[in-house]
Structures are given as structure tokens and as C-alpha cells.
Image (cartoon, rainbow, N blue to C red):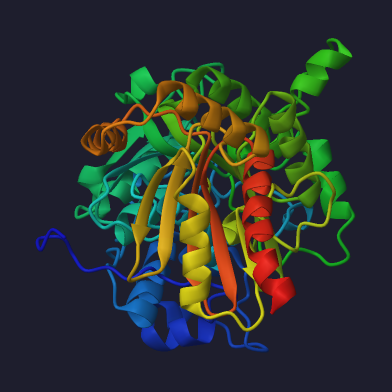
Amino acid sequence: MNPSLPTYKPLDYYDDYIDFAILAAQDDDFAKVFKAHDSKMDLQDPRALQWVTFHAVVDLAQLLERDHKLYSLKKLPPVPDALKSTKLISTSPYNFQEHDASHFEESSFSKSVPHRYNYVRWIQEILDTTGDDYSDTYDPERQVIGIDIGTGASAIYPLLHTATRPLYRLAATELDAVSHAAAAHNISLNDHLAPRIRLYHPPSQDAPLLDLRALGLAGADFVMCNPPFYASTADLAARAARKAKPPSAVCTGAPVEMIYGATLGSTAAAYEQNPGGDVGFCYRIVEESRGLKERVQWFTCMMGKLESLGQVVERLRSVGVRNWAIGCLSTGKTRRWVVGWSWGGKRPRSNLVRNPQVTIGGVQPFPTEQTLHVNESSVDELWNITVNTLRPLDMRIEADMEKKTIMGFARENVWSRAARRKRARENAHSGSRDEEMKEVEKDQGESDEEEDVALGFKVEARKGSIDIRWLEGMESSLFESFVGMLHRAVLPRQSNG
């Protein structure tokens, strides 16, 4: 480990809203606008919401310092006159539009800092569990490049990523001119993070969302996006009208951040390609990802409706994506749904790709972890079974006897009866080989960085169980077959015990 890097312990997910009373006790300025009424902040008061929103980065700093003693973001001074607009309610750069607050969903920036951080944390864990070292843990020396599509006036996602991961660099795009200026202002105020954030203003709304050349990138580790939720102002009003209770906060989003129009006045196929709102925007990212393929490891989006998640996964499957992940980020009563997909074969942990709160069919990916339970078996017994089962197979094996783990990589199914018979025939035809030659060939195979991997796995022997982790591969049926083979290997021990 590089001793010059800051020490880092990942933050936990936040499962509740920020406690305004605690923040008021910690910050005198905040206390002046805080209204203690049933222990709630009056977010219908634009002045209060403006303060909360403008100083949301301070809230984040307090969360980081209070909960984890980590990096902190600097407190923001008053917004300069150059960023004021007559179209805004106040001097805040967060683009509060003049409108009837009852038409909009809850969108207080401060109250949503936790679930925005949860989205960041989910992405970081996806990357941690699909690294080249297959360690399933955070690598503090891994340099990561991310892209935030439509970063908004706060630029909160680049700030969150760079504040919590010292080797992360972010390219952020923002189409709206006012929001772009505000984002640039906020980034510049955090000069300890600004060198690792690049802000880009697309030339038009028709420009590619992921123009790597314009961003000065050859590729990226991840893409993230919190797309506009609504397809039109009518859609926005209709969804608000269906709510049982009015929103708890006035809207803080610019129109470009709230609405992405559908393709209308054309064919049904055109509308299906772009139904607008978060689904239509995600479809656009899916389509662009088809051209980029593995130049980006993970593409992700966060949406406001479970229905939207289902539609996006259906589109992913229709265009040939076989490696995707879904999740539900719960913060208080608010839920946000996340989806990620990769054109590569590295597989995240099961808890990151599947979620029990996603209740619609056809959305959950195949689990990437399986456990075989073997009653009254010691660790050594199960380790010996595993080793004796896998070593004869034609695959690359890395065994760690101390940790009782085996990591393996196969070019194809080499454990089926047909594969074993084929190998036996080939060995009989070629005759025996010199042991030294075998070792040379083994070393060459292990050093071949271009090796095609149909299945990568890690097996760990425990007392009474064997844990199997799917690390890499495009075919879930191959992983399922491998698990079945190991299960049959331990069945004789189980049935005779």
C-alpha cells in the first residue's frame, strides 16, 4: 500500500434522513432558520429551503465528520452576484423555479443527501467487487475515472465521490447554463477536490450524452446519472395529483433536470424508443453504451419508480446485456431504484446485483453467490473434497491452503462428462509428457493476460459449508452447472455420513 495515500474506511449506507435538530445544534447559521415544529424543518418556506439547499455540502461535511471522521467539504460563502437570476426565487444558484410547490414531489436537496450518497456508495461497491484483483474489497491504490451525466447545480455527485475516494476523478456534464455556472462555482470552492473534477458543457441537447473524446477520455470505470423523472409538465402534475399527501418541500430542480420529453408526433416505434422521463433518458444511455461497450466498465442510472426499473431492465435484455445489477436505496420513507449494466464479464457480489424489495418479475439477475451446506463436515474435509475435485480439471487454479480458498478460471465447461472424456482421449493420443514441460506450460498459462475466461470463480471451504462466488463470465448457466458439479462432489460424503 502506498503510505502517502490517506487512510480510508468506507462509509455505511444511510437509512434515514438528516436530523435537522442535530445540525441546528452544530451550526449557528442553520439554527437561525431552523423551525422546531414537531421536530421538522419547514421546507415549504423558500428561505429555509434555500439555506438548506445552498449549504447542503456543509450538511455532507457534518455527516462525514460526525459519523466517520473523514474528508470534509468546505463551507460555501454567499453566492456571487454574477450567478443571480431574476428567474430564480432567491440568490441561490440551485435554480429554484417559481411554481406551485404542490405540483412537485419531495426534492429537498438536504434531505436527499443521504440517498445521493447511497447511490455513490452502491457504485463504489460495484467497482470494489469487480476489480482486476478479484478481492471483493476496496483497493485504495486503484485509480478510477467516472462520468456524471447532468451533474446539476450542486455538482454533488462528483464532490461526494472525490471526497470519499482520494484516487477517484470525475468528468461531469451539465447542459443548463445556470446550473453549469453554479456547479463550476461550487466545485471551485472546494479547491482540495476541484483538481480531480472536470466540468463539461455539451453544445446542445442533441449532443451525445457520453462523448468520451469531448471529455478527453479514452474510457471510464463508471457512468452515473440521476435522470429527469418526468416526460412532460402534464406527467409531472398527474403524478403529483396521485399522491395522498402534498410534498414536504418546494421544488429545487431546473426544468431540464425535471423533464425529458418523449418522442411524439411520430410512429409508435419512435415513442417506444423514447417514452420520455427517466425511462426515456436511460434508454438513450443504453443505446450509447452499445457503441462504447467495454470502454466503460459500468453504466448506471438512478430512478424514482420501480416500474421504470423494470422497463430499463427489459430494454437491457432486449439489446443483449447479460450482466446487470439492480438495487433499492431506502432513506427514511424515500426509495430510489438503481440499475447498472456492463458489457464485460466481471460480476459483483449478490447483495449488489439483487434486492428483495424489487418485486416485479424478470428483473433480478442470477445470483453470483451460492452456499452448499454439508452437515457435520469440518473445514479440512470440505477443503480436501474441493481440491481433489477441481485440480484434475483443465483450468487455471490458484489455491490458498491457509485461507482454504481456491480461485479458478476456465475457458469452457471442463467438468462435464463429455469434457472429461474428451480430455482423456486427447491425453491418451498425445502420450505422457515430461513433468518439467508441464510446469513450463502451466507457468505460461498463468501469465497469459489475454486468456479467454468463460467462468471465473472463488470457492471457500468453511465448517459445514462451501461458499461459491461467481467472479467472471457471461453465462449464468455455466456458473449454475459448476455449482451443481461441486454439489454432486459433496453428496457422497453427505449421504454416507
Residue at (47%, 72%) from the top-left corner? 12
Quarter of the figure with residue 7: bottom left
Residue 465, how many percent across, how many down? 59, 73
Q: Is 395 positioned to the left or the right of 45 in the image?
A: left
Q: How many numbered marks appear?
A: 0
Residue 155 in view (yes/no): no
Residue 297, how many percent across, how many down? 45, 35
Q: Is 4 positioned to the left or the right of 78 in the image?
A: left
Residue at (58%, 79%) from the top-left corner? 377
Residue 193, how many percent across, how many down? 24, 52
Classify the position of the C terminus by image quarter. bottom right
Residue at the farthest left position: 4
101 in relation to 495, above or below? above
Q: Is 146 positioned to the left or the right of 489 in the image?
A: left
235 in relation to 80, above or below? above
The one nearer the camera, 172 or 451, is: 451
Residue 446, how many percent across, how many down? 30, 38
The one nearer the camera, 416 or 324, is: 416
281 in relation to 359, above or below? above
The one nearer the camera, 66 or 489, is: 489
Residue at (47%, 46%) from the top-left corner? 392
Quarter of the figure with residue 242: bottom right
Residue 28 in view (yes/no): yes
Quarter of the figure with residue 129: bottom left
Classify the position of the N terminus by image quarter. bottom left
